[in-house]
């Protein structure tokens, strides 16, 4: 069955774009090293028409397919855990002309976030989603996961940037919604539906994206606090005082200490504070005085470092961006990406740490995240077994009014727990959509829905 499909696929994309054996290595292991699969082949189509033909052939032969962008996803959704074919989108990498009247751009799904940012920067423009995985994560993958990142509190998640998409459904039909019309209330919004669909409804081949002015003055400060409550309260004060606030990132002393140790950086602000908040504003003119004035007025700030130049800014950001890499060096982590209501963030942290150390006494818990939008990343290293924590941690999150996936999606990692969060009616609706878009069930069959 797979062999028959692959011989047809070789004719569609060309022999050299069907990879097998050892050459598939980078495509079968996820970024964290936690999810490892195998595949009969990695297929690299070069056009939307080729994607459509490949999907049609896979449907006819009942061969499951995993669309893959940069393979930076964190929930085991981008690798072939059940022997699926990998459909790599990396050859679809054209960036269209910037539409300077509409402030939009059309790009292929395999373009990385960094390539996109670089291409639009020369027009004084920027894309509103950014995060540490920018060098590899693709437009298609970030739409499929509805990625959030560092600037959600000002610009929203990926869904807020997507005006249109071109998508190949599981039937092989191509839907072209790339007109760029912002106002277009003509029935259900298919681009919205594709955001967060995690490759289960269709393969995104192109996107029409909103761009924003690249306000070139960035003011960045690291604030130290004695407790998380004070950092959460300060974030709210800054959101009101500084309309240009783009990022508010929470870090704790152990995580910052680990980053400094792993990357030989100096400990910030004397190295003795338990809680840090990294804040950044973007504006059209130098806003430093304003930032300093508001920081001075904040309650509970124990110490402050303000970046005086771009080099210092980059150093402050390394403390935050390098958390994920530093934790991976300790060991393969178990990751929880959760949102809490703002008034529960401070209480959640000790509760989660106590729960995890009671269930897994040999483990270490690292917590950091996008506190401006209530999103905490809980990473656990040194676990003895798989999945010993998941159900209990998710019960705690739900009991505190939160969500079990803030920005990374469900993937295969959380599919068993989705019914804890979504009602039977909601799940039926989602399954119904899946059945219409992908009637033969070939697109990411193990993702979102528990088998
Ligand atoms: P992949 O990992 O290849 O795929 C992810 C999912 O999307 C899979 O289910 C896959 O099947 C599907 N998919 C991929 N391409 C397509 C397509 N064209 N059509 C349909 N389905 C597709 N996420 C955040 O939200 N915020 C962060 O701050 C953040 N920081 C990160 C930092 C680092 C260092 C890393 C490694 C990751 C980070 N992420 C973050 C995770 C984030 O979810 C992914 O990086 C990104 O959204 C996935 O893009 P990708 O191209 O790598 O997709
Ligand atoms: C981040 O915010 C990413 O850096 C990754 O979403 C989070 O490593 C993680 O758990
Ligand atoms: Zn994140």
Image (cartoon, grey):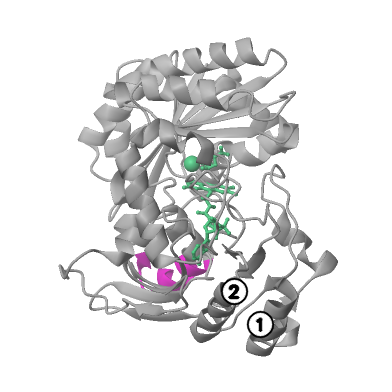
Of 219 and 232, which appears nearest the observer? Answer: 232
Q: Are marks 2 and 1 in contact (CB under 8 Å)?
A: yes
Of 312 and 102, which appears nearest the observer? Answer: 102
- Residue 342 lies left or right of residue 368; in this view the side is left
- Residue 327: x %, y % from top left: 67, 34
Q: How far apart in space, not on screen, are marks 2 and 1 (Cα)? A: 9 Å
SS state under label 2: helix
Residue bearing the label numbered 1 = 9
Residue at left 74%, top 33%? 331
In which quadrant is the N terminus drawn? bottom right
- Residue 217: x %, y % from top left: 36, 53
Q: Quadrant of residue 57?
A: bottom right
Residue bearing the label numbered 2 = 58
Picture layout, residue 355 above or below residue 390:
above
Residue at left 40%, top 17%? 346
Residue at left 41%, top 71%? 120
Q: Quadrant of residue 362?
A: top right
Task: Say if residue 117 shows up in the picture.
Answer: yes
Mark 2 Cβ and ligand 1 under 8 Å apart: no
Picture layout, residue 58 above or below residue 299:
below
Q: Earlier in the sequence, mark 2 or mark 1?
A: 1
- Magenta segment range? 115-126
Task: Say if residue 267 shows up in the picture.
Answer: no
Residue 122 magenta-drawn? Answer: yes
Residue at left 41%, top 48%? 148
């Amino acid at each position: 069955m797979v062999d028959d499909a692959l011989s047809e696929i070789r004719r569609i994309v060309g022999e050299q774009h069907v990879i097998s054996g050892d050459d598939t290595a980078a495509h079968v292991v996820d970024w964290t090293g936690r999810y490892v699969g195998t595949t009969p082949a990695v297929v690299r189509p070069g056009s939307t028409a080729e994607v459509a033909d490949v999907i049609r052939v896979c449907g006819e032969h009942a061969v499951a397919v995993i669309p893959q962008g940069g393979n930076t996803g964190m929930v085991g959704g981008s690798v072939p855990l059940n022997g699926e074919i990998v459909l790599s989108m990396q050859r679809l990498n054209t960036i269209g002309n910037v539409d300077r009247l509409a402030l939009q751009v059309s790009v292929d799904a395999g373009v990385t976030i960094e390539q996109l940012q670089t291409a639009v920067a020369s027009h004084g423009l920027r894309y509103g989603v950014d995060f540490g995985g920018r060098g590899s994560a693709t437009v298609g993958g970030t739409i499929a996961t509805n990625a959030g990142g560092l600037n959600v509190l000002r610009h929203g998640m990926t869904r807020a940037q997507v005006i249109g998409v071109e998508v190949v459904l599981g039937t092989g039909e191509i839907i072209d919604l790339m007109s760029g019309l912002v106002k277009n209330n003509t029935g259900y919004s298919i681009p919205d539906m594709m955001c967060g669909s995690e490759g289960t409804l269709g393969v995104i081949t192109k996107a029409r994206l909103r761009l924003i002015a690249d306000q070139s003055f960035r003011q960045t400060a690291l604030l130290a606090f004695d407790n998380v409550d004070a950092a959460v309260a300060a974030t709210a004060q800054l959101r009101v005082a500084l309309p240009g606030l783009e990022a508010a990132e929470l870090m704790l002393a152990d995580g910052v200490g680990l980053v400094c140790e792993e990357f030989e950086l100096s400990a910030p602000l004397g190295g003795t504070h338990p809680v840090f908040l990294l804040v950044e504003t973007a504006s059209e003119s130098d806003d430093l005085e304003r930032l300093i004035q508001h920081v001075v007025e904040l309650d509970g700030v124990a110490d402050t470092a303000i970046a005086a130049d771009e080099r210092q800014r980059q150093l402050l950001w390394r403390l935050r961006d390098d958390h994920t890499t530093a934790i991976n060096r300790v060991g393969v982590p178990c990751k929880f990406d959760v949102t809490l209501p703002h008034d529960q963030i401070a209480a959640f942290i000790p509760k989660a740490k106590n729960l995890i150390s009671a269930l897994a006494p040999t483990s270490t818990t690292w917590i950091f995240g996008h506190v401006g939008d209530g999103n905490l990343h809980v990473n656990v290293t040194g676990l003895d077994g798989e999945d010993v924590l998941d159900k209990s941690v998710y019960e705690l999150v739900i009991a505190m009014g939160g969500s079990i996936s803030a920005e990374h999606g469900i993937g295969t990692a959380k599919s068993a727990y989705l019914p804890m969060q979504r009602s039977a009616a909601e799940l039926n609706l989602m399954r119904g959509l899946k059945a219409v878009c992908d009637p033969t069930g070939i697109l990411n069959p193990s993702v979102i829905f528990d088998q």
